Amino acid sequence: MTEISPEVLDLRLRQQAILSDFGVEALRATELLPLLQRATELCAEGMNAQFCKALEYQPTQDMLLVCAGIGWEPDCIGRAVVGADLASPAGYALKTGRPVISNHLENETRFRTPELMASHGIRRAVNVLITNREGHYGVLEVDDTREGMFGPADIAFMQGFANLLGSAIERQRSEAQLKVALERQDLLSREMSHRVKNSLAVVAGLLALQARGTDNEDVKSALADARARVEAVAQVHDQLWRQPDLTRIDVAGFLEALCEKLTETAGAHALVCRAAAVTMPADLAIPLGLFVNELVTNAIKYAYPDGHGEIRVEAVMREDGGLTVSVCDDGIGLPPGFDPLKTRASLGMRVVGNLSRQLDGTLTLRPGKGAQFELRMAPRG
């Protein structure tokens, strides 16, 4: 068994510490070039070398581009290239997948010395492949102008860096592809919601044409109610696709925008919206919007016979994590014994009851002046 000198043992221990620290950096890295630059700096430090470079393979030119490095002239980084053929040390490592050590470049017969290395007086070099499941990224190379010997332990140290780089490159590329896919999905979802809104506007227009084509007042009234509900669904979709996050909605922003739209048909009524700054799953947006729309529309129609009064929409978060949504007015109130979940006199109230169940909520009437509807929604993620 060959005895290891204290100096060599200290170097190997320091290399392991450097490699361990870099592994943490590689896991946290979000940008590739700074990570490659850091790898070249630490790799040169761990091997007491003057030069180190990371080479990215350019398949269209069959060249290796110096994308990061230490010790080289500043204008080399991002511009200098070396051959990727078998006659180049780095090219040989790339094409064969095997590490390459050249301890005497001036006497080397296997490879030519690339111009970049010759101009810097490089006398020895070691190359290892940077690769992952997606393919070969390039080569990590350490160089020096001084005499000395690179050995198998140096290859093991460099290969550790190369393996960490390969994994980090694969992870970053996968994350970038996932981000593109999610952005496309988000765009498609917004486009779908926008098209639904436009299609519903067409349906509302057809209902309006049918209403104008009949003299029967009952039919006109029914068509007008149907048109109003179709337009309500369209308005909710219009607000939904404008939300910054289609997976969750900002309750305050969503309800405020919806109430602002309802104000256009509120006449002299004052529509007030107070909503907590909370989010909720986007799949609840449509039933919540329709619930508020139905009750506000009813209040506009029936709460104030003189044609003006205040209608309040509120949404507050409870201590148990659930959301309480209320629509209230100070108008003439509801008939004695009115139960919004049992009455069959109004289609609107049946719609409100169905929407309450979709929202997994409990609908009640609060005591007080006017009509005060309160929906207590169960806690949701």
Image: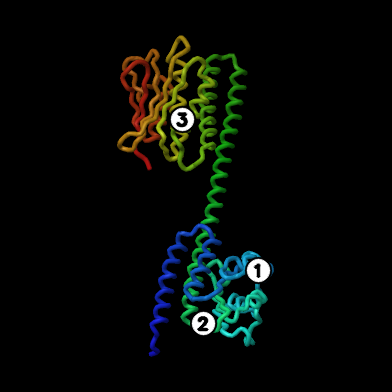
The kind of secondary structure element at disc 2 is: loop
Local crowd size for mark 3, using a 10 Å CA cut-off: few (<14), some (14–19), many (≥20): many
Local crowd size for mark 1, using a 10 Å CA cut-off: few (<14), some (14–19), many (≥20): some
Real-space CA distance between mark 3 and mark 2, rounded to the nearest whole angstrom: 69 Å
Q: Residue 310 sits in which quadrant?
A: top left
Looking at the image, do the residues carrying marks 1 and 3 touch, with CB atoms under 8 Å apart?
A: no
Residue under pointer 2: 150
Q: Is residue 136 visible?
A: no
Q: On residue 80, which mark appears?
A: 1
Q: Quadrant of the C terminus?
A: top left
Please report the residue visible at 42 percent of the width from the left and 66 percent of the height from the top.
Answer: 21
Tag nearer the camera, 1 or 3: 1
- Up the image or down, 312 lies above or below 149; here it is above
Residue nearest the viewer, comparing 320 with 46: 46
Task: Return the disc, 1 or 2, that comes first in the chain's sequence.
Answer: 1
Q: Residue 201 sits in which quadrant?
A: top right
Real-space CA distance between mark 1 and mark 3, rounded to the nearest whole angstrom: 58 Å
The image shows residue 380 at horizontal and vertical percentages of 37, 40
Residue nearest the viewer, comparing 274 with 366: 274
Residue type pointed to by label 3:
Leu
Looking at the image, do the residues carrying marks 3 and 2 touch, with CB atoms under 8 Å apart?
A: no
Residue type pointed to by label 1:
Ala
Local crowd size for mark 2, using a 10 Å CA cut-off: few (<14), some (14–19), many (≥20): some
Residue under pointer 3: 255
Please report the residue visible at 52 percent of the width from the left and 84 percent of the height from the top.
Answer: 149
